Image: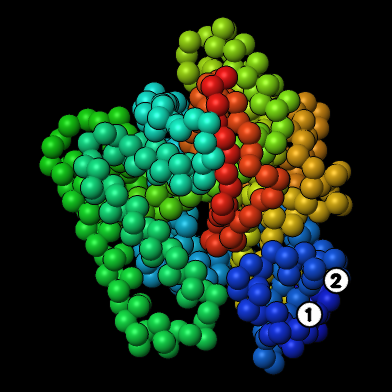
Amino acid sequence: MPISKKYNYPPKLSIFRFLVDAEGVRRNPIPYHQKYFERFGDSFSIKIGKSRHIILSRDNDVAQYILQKNHKNYHKSKFQSVYLSKYLGKGLLTVDGEYWLKQRRLIQPAFHKQKMNQLVENMKTTIVSELEGIVENEKIDVFPLMSELAFNVVAKSLFQFSIAEEKLDRIKYIIETVQNFLIKEIRLPHKAWWFSASGQVKKHLQLAEENNEIIRGIIEERTASKTYVNDLLNMLLETRYEDTGEGMSIEQLIDEIKILFIAGHETTANTLTFTLHLLGNHTDVQQRIFDEIVNVEADTDNVVEQLQKMSYTNAVLNESMRLYPPAWITDRQNVEDDSLGEFNIKKDTLIGVSFYELHRNPKYWKNPDHFDPDRFLGEQKKQSMQYFYPFGAGPRMCIGTGFAIYEMCLAISYIVKRYKIVSVGNTVNFNPLITLKPVGIEVVFSQR
């Protein structure tokens, strides 16, 4: 259907109000987004210059349209394709078009459920090792603990147990340092000249290159050894392109491994932290998880079978990700003019979908701010899943979803089986960076 050249957009936030709020938005955009949605409805727009528009939405129809129904017309924005790729290279998270499709088809089999099942024992061993020394009966800032756990699970699933701790520590430091600088670049574009002139861009590009060299060394050491190791690196080395029968180049492997570290580490740490806080304020939910673990372990000794039977634990994690989605926002730009519901939008319109707000939109959720894992059980689950985007949606849905769910179920079941959790306070503070990062969330663990 031809699109009218008479463009129209959702209700407009004035550029004056946007500039007045800009510093507050930079620090934490979520309260401002909430205020704008309450004022304008489920979508609003901002006009930049003479003809550029930005749309922000919490409308499920918009999310489904750009991520699924017409995804071919919606590519990742420059925030992701330019800023991220400068430091992370050309991996699944940062590329688009034919190259993305080729890489996705190549890597997908490594994340097939049967492949993930092979990693479960290693995953469980790492989790037990990380958590067996939990400090009891003292306030603990949970995020650093969960961050260390999640990073080591990804690292040892990628490289099994063959990598030196100092290399892992250096990779972790570089990833965190570069990401923090990347956020500054995205949120403070007017300071780009200063970041460049002061040498900060150069410094962080050098760190990114150091990370590349560490990972390159690990890959070369593995290929030279010619030994079979049951880990993700081996699965990635075994992948072959359909058209040529060749594997990925070392440069491609490095880029994809960096993406796996980023995507598989912090998002999981965030969710585990928020989940432990919620459990610490809901002893009844803790008890139901404990009862489920006892029943499941009585049924089978097989870890994969146990994970598949943890329906309530899974529901708790889903409800935690509804309230605090780790990837809290996504964006796309349309390649061609398009109709977005009742709006005719010009090509290169930047469209953001706030999953944080969509997951709390009263149009889709009853008592949206209330923690209720039963939303994700039985008949209610079918309804809830229509409006639920913890791992994105459509062809670009997170490739590591199964890996993340296994890891989080193993971690939560291990903790709840051994400890009672009490949260220190009810307030949840977070910092919306690339992911929704928890801040200062404390709990007390005591022997169950």
Say which of 56 and 276 sits in front: 276
> Where's residue 423, x and y in %?
64, 38
Q: Secondary structure at mark 2?
A: helix
Residue 331 location (% of width, % of height): 62, 65
User: At 80% from the left edge and 80% from the top edge, which residue is drawn?
Assistant: 12
The C terminus - image quarter: top right
Residue type, mark 1 in image = Leu
Name the spot of residue 54 as percent of width and height, x first. Answer: 69, 76
Q: Label 2: which residue? A: 40
Q: Which residue is mark 1?
A: 13
Farthest front residue?
A: 138
> Dot 1 lies on which element?
loop
Q: CA distance from mark 2 to mark 1?
A: 8 Å
Q: Which mark is residue 275?
A: none
Apparent side of residue 119 relative to residue 314 in the rendered image (left or right): left
| The N terminus lies in quadrant | bottom right
Q: Residue furthest left?
A: 224
Q: Nearer the viewer, residue 302 or 200?
A: 200
Dots 2, 1 in contact, CB < 8 A? yes
